[in-house]
Image (tube, rainbow, N blue to C red):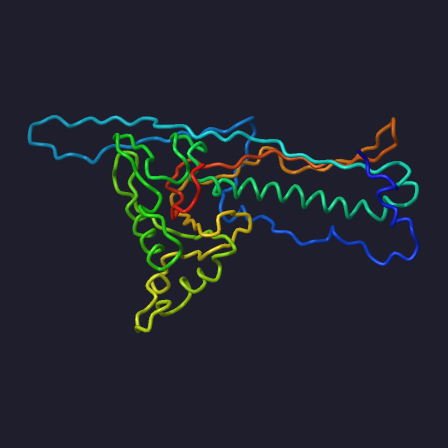
Amino acid sequence: MAISRSQLVKELEPGLNALFGLEYSRYENQHAEIFATETSDRAFEEEVMLSGFASAPTKQEGAGVVFDQAGETFTARYNHETIALAFAITEEAIEDNLYDRLAGRYTRALARSMANTKQVKAANILNNAQVTTAVGGDGESLIGNAHPLATGGTFSNVLATAADLNETSLEQSLIDIAGFVDERGLKIASSGRKMIIPKELQFTAERIMKSPMRVGTADNDINAINNMGMVPEGYRVNNFLTDTDSFFLLTDVPNGLKYFVRSPIKTAMEGDFDTGNMRFKARERYSFGWSDPRCIFGNGNLPTS
């Protein structure tokens, strides 16, 4: 339905001082703090996890060398979605100069709506990171304690006991990240690099990560997390996270959380011959997801359904 003069009656009245409701600032591009951006030229993208080799054995004198096999373990798939929204202004509203006064404002509102959807979809990867039905290529949720290995075992990227953000839980998370193994069970050099938190934890994170001394004690102990530079990229607030006591540590493991751009946002404007209405549209295609779950570590407070 087009925006008509009856919906904009005040716009036709003389002496109007201001229009409001469409000029709010917006949280923009917070997904870029979490996801690596890549481009795509097909309907979907797939990435295959490969297993390496087991630890090399000792070769006895005169004995033959042991052969090992590598292979594919699972495939992560990114299915692109089309996001679009439009609005129209009637021919009569255009004739009465409402087009000049409102088109710019509603175009900005359209952009804000498109941006909001993108941020919500990005954040929902983390909001649903422990939902048992929201699984990745390995058949497990993004954050969990049963990610399968090629050896038949499993690895975990979540605290053994769920805990709120504090010095102890953050230190244990960093210790667990340093203990990650690859698909064949070999230790990998991994570490936490950035913490993602909801707005409710920003003051707690500031004290824990930036205080020179330990928080909440009278002892003359240094803040080891700060002193050792254990989370070198600090923390970032994401305003679209829904769980108020969950925190996430992004690691330096590659090929993790990804944002594929299939078609960048495009805007179009055209007139409708039958009605004379002017129509405006915005459209883009993209997908959010993950390949290697070792890219992130969670504190275990998220819902599972």
The quarter holding residue 47 reads: top left
Q: Is residue 103 above or below residue 273?
A: below
| Left or right: where 32 falls relative to 274 | left
At 91% from the left edge and 49% from the top edge, which residue is drawn?
Answer: 12
Rendered-image quadrant of the C terminus = top left
The image shows residue 162 at horizontal and vertical percentages of: 36, 48
Please tell me which residue lies in front, 3 or 179.
Answer: 3
Q: Is residue 253 above or below residue 286?
A: below
| Left or right: where 135 falls relative to 283 | left
The image shows residue 226 at horizontal and vertical percentages of: 37, 63
- Residue at the far left in the pictured view: 61
Q: Is residue 209 above or below residue 192?
A: below
The quarter holding residue 89 reads: top right
Q: Number of callouts in the render?
A: 0
Please tell me which residue lies in front, 299 or 46.
Answer: 299
Rendered-image quadrant of the N terminus = top right
Q: Is residue 145 above or below residue 204?
A: above
Please tell me which residue lies in front, 258 or 85.
Answer: 85
At 58% from the left edge and 31% from the top edge, which residue is drawn?
Answer: 81
The image shows residue 146 at horizontal and vertical percentages of: 32, 36
At 28% from the left edge and 46% from the top edge, which residue is drawn?
Answer: 179
| Left or right: where 28 falls relative to 253 | right
The image shows residue 243 at horizontal and vertical percentages of: 48, 48
The quarter holding residue 64 reads: top left
